[in-house]
Amino acid sequence: MAAVFLVFALDTPNTHSLKLTWLSVVALITAFRFIDWLYWLIKLRRTKYQALGARNRVVLGVISLSLMWCIYSVVFYESMDLTELALTFAMLCTLSSGANSALSGHKKTAILYTVLLLTPASCMALFSGVTVHVFIGCLGILYNISITFSAARAADLTEEAVKLRNENKHILEKMHQEIAQNDAVHEELSQAYSQVTASKENLEKEVERRTDEIRMLSSLDPLTQLYNREAFIHQLSITAAKSIKSGHSVALLFIDLNGFKKVNDTLGHKVGDAVLVEVAGRIGAFANDYQAGRWGGDEFLMVLPYADHETAISVANALLARISQPLDVMSNQLCVSATIGIAMLPEHTSSETELIQLADFAMFEQKKLHLSEPRMFTQDLFENLKQIENLRNGLQEAISRKQLYLCYQPIVKCKTKEPWSFEALLRWNFNGNLVGPDTFIPLAEQTGLIHEIGAWVLNRACIDASQWQHSPNASVSVNVSITQLLDSDFIGILDKALNTSKLQPERLHLEITESMFADNKDKVKAKINAIKDRNVQVSIDDFGTGYSSLSQLQTLNFDTIKIDRSFVLNMHQGGEAIIRATLFIAKQFGCKTVAEGIETEQEALKLSEMGVDYLQGFLFSKPIINDELRRWVENIET
């Protein structure tokens, strides 16, 4: 156990393999001793046997182990820091103290064991020239002398006791007296040792400092060896207090890698972890005396004390250049980039936690714009942040205040232009202002309101469709996010919407974005199968823009493929080939096709000639509220 502790608890990369070899030899010797003990216990114990051979094997095993400990202290002495050296000496002293009693049956072995344990290491420390090491070496020599004397004394007493026990049992009282005297000697030695340890008071501060370093190790991220969240916030607090006290600002850099998810998806998490380690090494090396930490996933933090705006921007630009240099990871040549947001303390906030949030927000805003240079947090961003917070709070009451409503965009049959389905599109009228879905849907997903809002949309769309007397056979299409689909209550919500509205399941189409299939393949497949068991139709939205493969698609049960608007726009620049390939795939899978974003008669005619089944776009109608659908249908019919 002592050997395992030293090898793994005090592991250093440059000696790891050598320590493992040493530990293997110790394990073999220990196994030999254990087997020998079992042999004695089972075969020899209750028989008259030649004790000499058994004793020699015990002595051989004990001395072999003491030699291994001697080798450890000598071979790894130069690589030990003060903490490891102190713990190693403490371990050796503990082992020699235990041997004092355990080996008292054989005096030479007891003395040799103790000498081999402590003498070499103590001598190396004594002549190392390092003051602290010399002091430890002196303590080791003194303790070695005292414990050797004690071992010899204990061995003499044990030998005498065995003789007396076999010669005359009445003399056992004398043995007890000798033991008492031995205890008195031990007491005197303990007092002497206490006096020696009193001189170690000068080392207390150093020990405390090393203890803090050990505590710091427990605060590191296990993968990157940078500070974890809790430790980084603690260090940020300390750094901020010192900088502000001296009248300087503190800059915080929030660093987020670009395209890291694609590395994980294409090359695997093992390569992804290796990329994180390499990038963390670059950030840590670049930070130098600054503190750096891993916030989570592919997000990192770095604090710059005594920094102004210009310094923070310059450091961030240099860091971006360093991160962007090519990576050689597990035989893969990779290039990653990053987006950096910066916030200043106390200029932007006096709270360390809020400082991180502001830098994160600046990074997020920059990431949305796909810009490569660092972004400093500004008051405009702060106003935007307040607006988003206002929207987030308003979204919580949007349903109860009846601010959400649905618009419907027709999907028509390609040949007759009759309505085949109507896609439900959610709108939000927030205090007289229309908020786009691209703004409030991500907020709903972040806050968890997407489940409540999604359930309302599904229920409202089913009720509206069940009352369409103008188009009693037309379907209604409802978009479903990955968050909704994977929710454990989604199928129950679907059943409730169908039961409440009395809408025929065949008239409900659930549109699922293709990118959902990249992750959670098994869960998505199970949910789609459950949807199809209810005769609800399933459409794949934005086909060709995600990362799904044909091998994934062929395992899924779907009815319609929606061709993305981007391919329609680029029919003369490669889009037509993609559309034809999509039509071929749809035909092979036995499903229908819908082309989105049709704005001209030429586009409609071309797609019709290519074999598209249904069309959707402004050419036929913009999204309109439910009450206006009847008028639109009447205009189509006339």
Image (cartoon, rainbow, N blue to C red):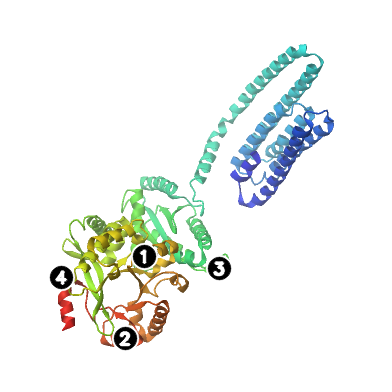
Q: CA distance from mark 3 to mark 4?
A: 58 Å
Name the residue that disc number 3 marks: 332
Q: CA distance from mark 2 to mark 4?
A: 30 Å
Q: Position of residue 241 (x, y in %)?
A: 38, 45
In which quarter of the view is residue 328 placed?
Answer: bottom right
**Residue 445 at least partly seen:** yes
Question: Residue at coordinates 59% horizontally, 43% vertically from top-left?
Answer: 9
Q: Earlier in the sequence, mark 2 or mark 4?
A: 2
In which quarter of the view is residue 170 placed?
Answer: top right
Q: Nearer the viewer, mark 1 or mark 3?
A: 1
Q: Is residue 388 above or below residue 604?
A: above
Badge 1: how crowded within 10 Å, few (<14), some, or many (20+)? few
Name the residue that disc number 2 marks: 608
Name the amino acid, label 2. Ser
Q: CA distance from mark 1 to mark 3?
A: 44 Å
Q: Is residue 624 above or below residue 57?
A: below
417 or 187, which is in the foreground? 417
467 or 238, which is in the foreground? 467
Q: Earlier in the sequence, mark 1 or mark 4?
A: 1
Name the residue that disc number 1 marks: 533
Q: Is residue 570 above or below residue 316?
A: below
Q: Position of residue 496 (x, y in %)?
A: 27, 59
Name the residue that disc number 4 marks: 627
Give SS at disc 2: helix
**Residue 443 at least partly seen:** no
